Amino acid sequence: MVLSEKLAGLGELTMIPLDPAAHAPIVHEWVIKPRNRFWGMTSHTVDEVADIYGFVDSLDTHHAYLLLLDDGPIGIFQTYEPAQDPVGECYDVQPGDFGMHLLLDAGDRHLPHLTSAVFPVLMNHLFADPAHQRIVAEPDIRNERMISRLQREGYRLGAQIDLGHKKAQLTFLERLDWRHGVPGGVAEDRG
């Protein structure tokens, strides 16, 4: 287990390394849904999903995790080093940049304000590493809900970039912004 934290009114959030073979069926169930189309895998098979996450698992610079709430799967959290990712070819990577992707899908479970509860926990987790000075995310430019969410959490918009498979909106969350209590941030220094 990588992370465990109680979410008021929701349950125990845990994060475990994603097992490409064992978790491919649930990940596949999520990524083929039209609402999750920006993940870019709507036409993938379970085996293709397993292969993709097998590749991610083989890298030292990229990591995928399964998010669980009271042991029920609710999403995927991925991290990466931008300098070792195609996104790093599209902007001036700074020392301390660290990338992330998040997909939450609680299925038919009614979990009000899930994203609002999970997001700060994940950002606190990332910033617990003092080497992480700025969190980078690059949602599809059509994913207005995620871009809006990131801005509410204190991310600042950067350039729009072309990654080949998608046109993306670069966004950045500075450690100091998170530390000093921008919306969604924490008020005290966590690292």
Image (tube, rainbow, N blue to C red):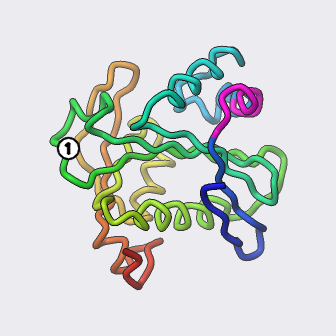
SS for tag 1? loop
Residue 68 image offset from top left, x and y in percent: 73, 53
The stretch in magenta equals 18-27
Q: Is residue 52 above or below residue 90?
A: above
Q: Residue furthest left?
A: 92
Pick whichever, 78 or 167, lies toward us.
78
Q: Is residue 159 above or below residue 3?
A: above
Residue placed at 28% from the left, 73% from the top? 176
Residue placed at 79% from the left, 44% from the top? 107
Q: Quadrant for the C terminus, please.
A: bottom left
In the rendered image, residue 20 lying in the magenta stretch gets the answer yes
Q: Is residue 26 toward the left or the right of residue 114 in the image?
A: right
Residue 162 image offset from top left, x and y in percent: 28, 26
For residue 31, what is the image quadrant?
top right
For residue 50, what is the image quadrant?
top right
Provide the major secondary structure of the magenta segment. helix
Circle 1: residue type: Val
Residue placed under numbered mark 1 in the picture: 93
Residue placed at 50% from the left, 27% from the top? 58
For residue 183, what is the image quadrant?
bottom left
Q: Is residue 8 toward the left or the right of residue 116 in the image?
A: right
Q: Quadrant for the N terminus, please.
A: bottom right
Pick whichever, 52 or 186, lies toward us.
52
In the rendered image, residue 32 lying in the magenta stretch gets the answer no
Residue placed at 51% from the left, 42% from the top? 78
For label 1, the crowd category at 10 Å Cα-Cα, with few meaning under 14, some 14 to 19 and many 20 or more, is some
Q: Is residue 127 above or below residue 179?
A: above
Residue 81 image offset from top left, x and y in percent: 34, 42
Q: Residue furthest bottom?
A: 188
Pick whichever, 178 or 140, lies toward us.
178
